[in-house]
Image (cartoon, rainbow, N blue to C red):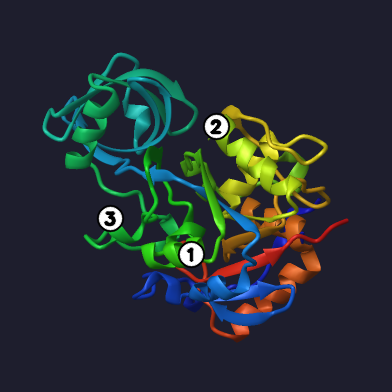
Amino acid sequence: MRVDLFDFDLPEKFIAKEPVAKRDEAKLLLVPQLENKRVKDLVDILPADSLIVFNNTKVIPARIFGVCNGRNFEATLHKNVALDTWLAFIRNSKKLHEGDEISFGDGLLIGTVKSKQGESGVELCFNKSGHEFFDVLAKIGTLPLPPYLKREVKKEDFENYQTVYAKIEGAVAAPTAGLHFTDELLQKLKAKGIDMVELTLHVGAGTFQPVKVEDTKDHKMHSEYVVISEEVANKINDAKRAGKKIIGVGTTVLRSLESAVDEDGFIHPFAKETDIFITPPYTFRSIDYLMTNFHLPKSTLFMLVCAFAGMDEMKKAYEFAKENDYRFYSYGDASLLKRKDN
């Protein structure tokens, strides 16, 4: 499909630079009904015989600053490829050569250039790994906030840009639909009898990369690592057999499940990379509803929601959202989309 079919006008004023004061007070747009709700209303909206799937990835302070041969370098880690090895985007990477050592955080972390990866990509082998690596990263790194926020990181971002259920370290971007949940809201949902399970997809920096081609068939989707345990797969499948509605929180959950679902709609355990790229037309088999934020024009995420809920429906929803002062992107408001069956 032509990429320009997924374009729409979005003035700067709709981009949320800060989150709402209380997470679940964010607006929630029901699609296709076009009803205005709040995230906290999910307790009343979702039926008791449903199951919610969350992504429990945890954002790491992946932006680090170092020195090599007297030059300053800024690196953004975006993918863990071995215990001690990461892919990173580095400004002025042309000045680096294989074997160069970059001293990060005044020597607390040393990264050796293992290989160059395209225009700004570098493969770095570090002198620390595992928990020791993440402990040091917590001391010297800062959050790689989405570039469209166009501001520096604040102290509050370290809490705000993390879901309350984040557990597994490895993401360089938050699964933003999940930012709207509070511990209180989760407890209320559980009290209603709604089941919950978690999978892990470590969101990579590729989620921010623009689509630069004219046709979707020419776009190369970034790959991300997904883990769906056998226990989680079984719980989702049991819920399906029982006729329960499955709600995915975030496009990362939807992409993960669609990577692991079979033709009969059942989920299989999954622990590998996925580069699934979903555009209309597409037959979804994994979930019934998708909770997600409002996305960029011509982005892979907007293409995904158009495939899920219908292109005409999503364009109407986004125009309605602007007319009703919804806030867009990572710190913005949310929508609850019903799957449009083909």
Residue assigned mark 2 = 229
Q: Of the residues shown, which amino acid type is indicated by label 3?
A: Phe
Q: Are marks 1 and 2 in contact (CB under 8 Å)?
A: no
| Residue 320 locus on image (x, y percent) | 66, 81
Most extreme residue toward the bottom is 323
Q: Earlier in the sequence, mark 1 or mark 2?
A: 1
Quarter the C terminus occupies? bottom right
Q: Which mark is drawn over residue 335?
A: none
Residue assigned mark 1 = 191
Q: Of the residues shown, which amino acid type is indicated by label 1?
A: Ala
Q: Of the residues shown, which amino acid type is indicated by label 2?
A: Ser
Rendered residue at 58%/47% (across/down): 253
Where 104 sits versus 290, above or below?
A: above
Most extreme residue toward the left is 106
Looking at this view, is 268 or 280 the one in front?
268
Residue assigned mark 3 = 158
Q: Are marks 2 and 3 in contact (CB under 8 Å)?
A: no
Where 231 sits versus 306, above or below?
A: above
